[in-house]
Amino acid sequence: MEFIHIALIEDDPVIRESLTTYLGAHPAIEISVVADSVEQFLEQVQPASRPLQADLLLLDIGLPGMTGLEGIRHIRQKCPDMDIVMLTTFEDDDKIFKALCSGACSYITKRTPLNTIQEAVFTIHRGGSYMSPSIARKVVQHFMPKAPKADDVLSPRQQQIVQGLVDGLSYKMIADKLSISIDTVRDHIKHIYRALEVNSKVEVIRLSLDGKI
Amino acid sequence: MEFIHIALIEDDPVIRESLTTYLGAHPAIEISVVADSVEQFLEQVQPASRPLQADLLLLDIGLPGMTGLEGIRHIRQKCPDMDIVMLTTFEDDDKIFKALCSGACSYITKRTPLNTIQEAVFTIHRGGSYMSPSIARKVVQHFMPKAPKADDVLSPRQQQIVQGLVDGLSYKMIADKLSISIDTVRDHIKHIYRALEVNSKVEVIRLSLDGKI
DNA sequence: AACCAAACCACATCATCATGCGGTTGTTTG
DNA sequence: CAAACAACCGCATGATGATGTGGTTTGGTT
């Protein structure tokens, strides 16, 4: 059985201790790097004597010096294959999305019981991702129909045509795909333009990509 | 203790049975609506005699008639306060994001053990969200710096041209904006196509919109 | 000095798109 | 039933885009 190598960056000694002892107690887990700041962590992996010291990093946000959020980029640059798990008390949208956009793969609140964190570690090591329920909720809300998008303005057939455009197909290709004449495709597109009040392919594609259709 | 009212739309009788019996056995859960298609479900809630029959809907994707994905909108229109949980075998990005964008709040694979599904139900009812680990991974990847973006492949001038394209400008308009000849715009675009290995405007626009430039 | 890449311009050709007009079906709805 | 609408098709014309070949100027490298 291969160890799961974990790195931890956390400045609070109490939390650091409790995590290292609880997680380290598991026979399949080894805590290989511990640091109390991003800077210190980067120094430790600096030598590059070994290629990579950990599979997974538990990263706090509220750190002295460079914040965990800022640190993600630097860390990923040095250890691109390491899964980064945010482990923090902050739950505001801003921090969550900044973390995810910087490359964090999971986001767990510190309220989470230790055994759940341990489970999450295994889940993530298996290639999955774990989000605390409240965090996950915010993430999915990000996808939700923010603006009550103009949906019913397009018939199902018209939506198929739009899909074709978005996929980068030419009129001819769309016609073939839907087994209709290219003139019919033209006709649909005329109507689509009128319905969406645009007058070019790109505008339709942008509307679609922006989720407004 | 208040019941959690659950609705279920699933066409496979086996799965339907196993879910209703297992979940229904819990003292805090009541399965209040069961249907094997979106159409049938909508009929059942049609009367509107009671304002809302369920807090939470377990929704399959592979349904006869209207697919679950298409159904989400119609369902949300009728029951806006109900949490919609996709429960399906499909794990392709396309379906996942379509579901989330349509308003699903969770996405669980059918491989998930029943007790985990039950936990998820409670989690969601508490205002959280549960994503299967493999799904969650795909969702977070959506935020990640997609590809180590081909940034320096384009000169500053070329990036200006691309910006023009993204803004929906024609060659002529770009030329005017940058005070250069339309033939020069053409020339730049040729080079851009070669650099990005594409051969149409839309491809460039999509690359740019996807943050790959 | 020789070289190269970026930016600039021109001309040419064929494909694709935008848009107009006109027409046939079939379904839905007042 | 008639009106309305979606989907289907055809034809025509001008605009825009994709791609090639050829050229100049300028600023930075070797």
Image (cartoon, coloured by chain):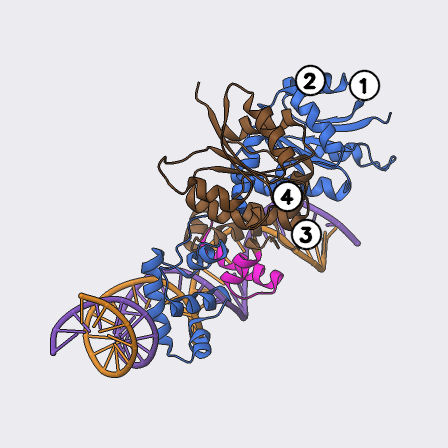
Chain colours: A brown, B blue, C purple, D orange
Q: Residue furthest front?
A: A13
Q: Are marks 1 and 2 on the same chain?
A: yes
Q: The residue tagged with tag 2: helix, strand or loop? A: helix
| Residue located beneath label 1 in the image | B27
Dot 4 and dot 2 residues touching (CB under 8 Å): no
Rounded to the nearest angstrom, the CA distance separating label 3 from label 2 is 36 Å
Of discs 4 and 1, which sits in the foreground? 4
Please report, as a chain letter, where disc 1 is located.
Answer: B
Is residue A143 toward the left or the right of residue B90 in the image? right
Rounded to the nearest angstrom, the CA distance separating label 4 from label 1 is 31 Å
N-terminal-most mark, 3 or 4? 4
Please report, as a chain letter, where disc 2 is located.
Answer: B
Q: The residue tagged with tag 1: helix, strand or loop? A: loop
The answer to if A140 sits in the magenta stretch is no
Q: Position of residue B50 (x, y in %)?
A: 87, 35
Quadrant in which residue D11 is drawn: bottom left
| Residue located beneath label 4 in the image | A139
